[in-house]
């Protein structure tokens, strides 16, 4: 195959990758240029499909031999039959979705498991900005001004755990991470994660 | 790269496959061209299906074309080292049944009468075209295709291949096409047909001994040509520019450049294409409707249950087969569990965009074809 998997996956993606079983049927929402799908195809022999809104990125994925649909993920997930994927990945997109509960419901319908990751809004640097500057915070993970951000909601690890309980999802795995060095490297945060993690990753089931 | 047009003829017997209309058309001749080499495993063949008025001359040049003035219609795409690489793949392109470029069509001689068929030619469908292409592949000893690729009416043939012979199709690339014609597309075809049939020279299709319905055919092509372009492309190319920068003549001469361009395209087409073929092929495209078949899982699976891999491509400014129709196809393929990729290409040149050199299309095709596992 003409796949050129990246030498090294972004740190959060490498954790997601470690949660996926070889040969799984995987749907990656907002797959970008397909780095994760390419890596999983090469190293775990998965059957992968991606959805990407950006035409140029979607074309880049197809050009590297991946199966990718260019379109809006909220529409595209509607057409799949029930349970047609083993894992559906929603990586760093939940904060940009209008009705996250509806979307997660759709994802749980088409996939046996769902992996969700998002920037953690309760990181101490963000808390400090609100506390001392009194301004809407910006961070490496959420690098936009309040007036031109695609992120229409902000989530914390604690929020997501509570949300999962309320809507009836079981959290099978959970990982809090702190990334640095252009997100290539990072470490897993196990103590005071809601304060110290820049991203949260959750594997959920219904 | 030199190519030559070949033909393959076969008899259709009483018990072999009849046309979709139930009529037996025999013998059938299909013109085809090949590029590249079929490998020993015979698994590197790609069938390219041409659009409405195209032909088997997909790429390269004929031996008797030393000036290289007549390249194939997809010469920028198909060839050594190109997007569809003839160093890797063996390319077959057939002229469709019903056409006038070497395959049996209404201008061919009816063996029963010794005269051209004219309207005695039976109605053929996209399915009939595909069945005849299958005969050519059988003749070439090809049992499985690495891919079937085509745009517009060629894209319809691609889809028909996937439901008729799923066991033969490893991957499919329908480009700028639809599962079925919209009322708009049928309407334009009907206007084109009427333009031909009201030309007194048409003579109910019996004109081969006399001057043909060139004026009607030219008008039909003018209509067709407009549907292949787009508002943006026409605005960019012509706007309201005057012919020869002259003032209005206050009569019905071509004052605008767009008028004279369409007249030129119309008469050029009338010089090379058969009016009856336009009638038959346009009707075949109007009849085409695979929506139900693509919506059922079984028709897209071969006996072993394996699937084809699909790449659906549409263009933003295509108003003949707009993106929503490509999306309907993608939806149907997803619902039936097919492995499908889709990309809409940003282009302002309308339906014909796939015939214009563009590295985005080339990269998509090249990467997709490389990504298909060998058998």
Image: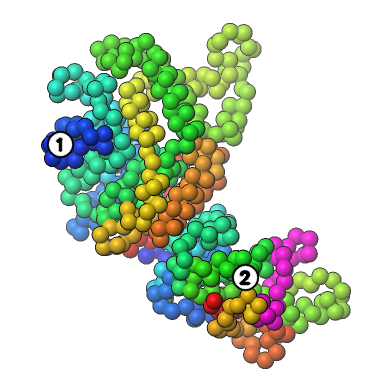
Left or right of A79? Residue A194 is right
Left or right of A43? Residue B305 is left
- Disc 2 target residue: A92
Image: B71 above or below A157: above
Image: A165 above or below B123: below
Which chain letter goes with mark 1?
A: B
- Disc 1 target residue: B12
**Span shown in magenta:** A141-163
Q: Is residue A154 magenta?
A: yes
Q: Residue furthest bottom?
A: A191
Residue drawn 47% across and 78% down?
Answer: A20
Disc 1 residue crowd, few under 14, some 14–19, many 20+, Cα 10 Å: some
Task: Return the x and y of residue A159 as percentages of the image width and height.
Answer: 70, 78
Task: Return the x and y of residue B39 as percentages of the image width and height.
Answer: 22, 56
Q: Is residue B61 magenta?
A: no
Residue drawn 34% across and 11% down?
Answer: B201
**Residues flagged by tags 2 and 1 on a common chain:** no
Task: Return the x and y of residue B50 as percentages of the image width and height.
Answer: 35, 38
- Magenta stretch: helix, strand or loop mostly: loop
């Amino acid at each position: 195959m003409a796949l050129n998997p990246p030498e090294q996956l972004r740190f959060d993606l490498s954790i997601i990758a470690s949660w996926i079983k070889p040969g799984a049927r995987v749907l990656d929402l907002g797959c970008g240029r397909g780095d994760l799908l390419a890596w999983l195809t090469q190293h775990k022999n998965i059957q992968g499909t991606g959805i990407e809104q950006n035409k140029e990125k979607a074309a880049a994925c197809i050009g590297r031999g991946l199966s990718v649909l260019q379109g809006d993920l909220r529409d595209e997930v509607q057409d799949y039959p029930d349970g047609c994927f083993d894992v559906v990945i929603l990586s760093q997109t939940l904060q940009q979705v209008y009705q996250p509960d509806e979307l997660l419901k759709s994802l749980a319908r088409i996939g046996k498991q769902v992996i969700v990751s998002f920037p953690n809004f309760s990181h101490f640097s963000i808390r400090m900005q609100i506390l001392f500057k009194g301004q809407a915070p910006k961070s490496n993970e959420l690098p936009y001004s309040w007036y031109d951000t695609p992120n229409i909601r902000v989530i914390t690890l604690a929020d997501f755990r509570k949300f999962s309980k309320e809507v009836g999802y079981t959290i099978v795995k959970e990982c809090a991470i702190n990334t640095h060095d252009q997100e290539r490297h990072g470490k897993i945060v196990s103590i005071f994660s809601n304060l110290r993690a820049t991203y949260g990753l959750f594997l959920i089931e219904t | 790269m030199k190519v030559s047009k070949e033909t393959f003829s076969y008899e259709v017997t009483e018990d072999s496959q009849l046309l979709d209309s139930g009529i037996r058309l025999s013998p059938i001749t299909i013109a085809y061209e090949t590029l590249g080499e079929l490998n020993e495993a015979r698994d590197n063949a790609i069938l390219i299906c041409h659009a409405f008025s195209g032909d088997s001359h997909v790429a390269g040049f004929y031996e008797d074309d030393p000036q290289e003035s007549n390249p194939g219609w997809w010469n920028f795409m198909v060839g050594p080292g190109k997007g569809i690489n003839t160093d890797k793949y063996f390319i077959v392109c057939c002229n469709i049944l019903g056409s006038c470029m070497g395959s049996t069509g209404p201008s061919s001689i009816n063996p029963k009468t010794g005269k051209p068929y004219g309207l005695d030619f039976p109605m053929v469908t996209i399915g009939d075209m595909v069945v005849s292409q299958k005969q050519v592949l059988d003749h070439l000893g090809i049992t499985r295709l690495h891919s079937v690729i085509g745009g517009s009416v060629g894209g319809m043939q691609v889809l028909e291949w996937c439901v008729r012979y799923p066991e033969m199709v490893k991957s499919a690339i329908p480009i700028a096409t639809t599962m079925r014609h919209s009322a708009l597309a049928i309407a334009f075809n009907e206007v084109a047909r009427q333009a031909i049939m009201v030309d007194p020279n048409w003579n109910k299709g019996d004109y081969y001994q006399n001057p043909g319905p060139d004026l009607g055919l030219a008008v039909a092509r003018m209509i067709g040509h407009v549907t292949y372009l787009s508002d943006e492309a026409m605005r960019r190319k012509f706007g309201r520019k005057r012919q020869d920068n002259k003032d209005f003549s206050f009569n019905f001469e071509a004052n605008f450049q767009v008028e004279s361009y369409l007249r030129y395209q119309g008469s050029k087409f009338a010089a090379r294409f058969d009016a009856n073929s336009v009638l038959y092929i346009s009707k075949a495209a109007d009849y085409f409707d695979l929506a139900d078949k693509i919506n059922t899982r079984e028709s897209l699976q071969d006996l072993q249950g394996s699937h084809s891999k699909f790449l659906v491509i549409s263009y933003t400014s295509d108003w003949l087969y707009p993106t929503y129709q490509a999306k309907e196809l993608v939806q149907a393929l997803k619902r039936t569990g097919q492995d499908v990729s889709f990309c809409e290409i940003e282009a302002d040149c309308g339906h014909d965009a796939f015939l214009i050199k563009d590295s985005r299309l080339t990269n998509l095709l090249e990467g997709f074809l490389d990504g298909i596992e060998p058998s």
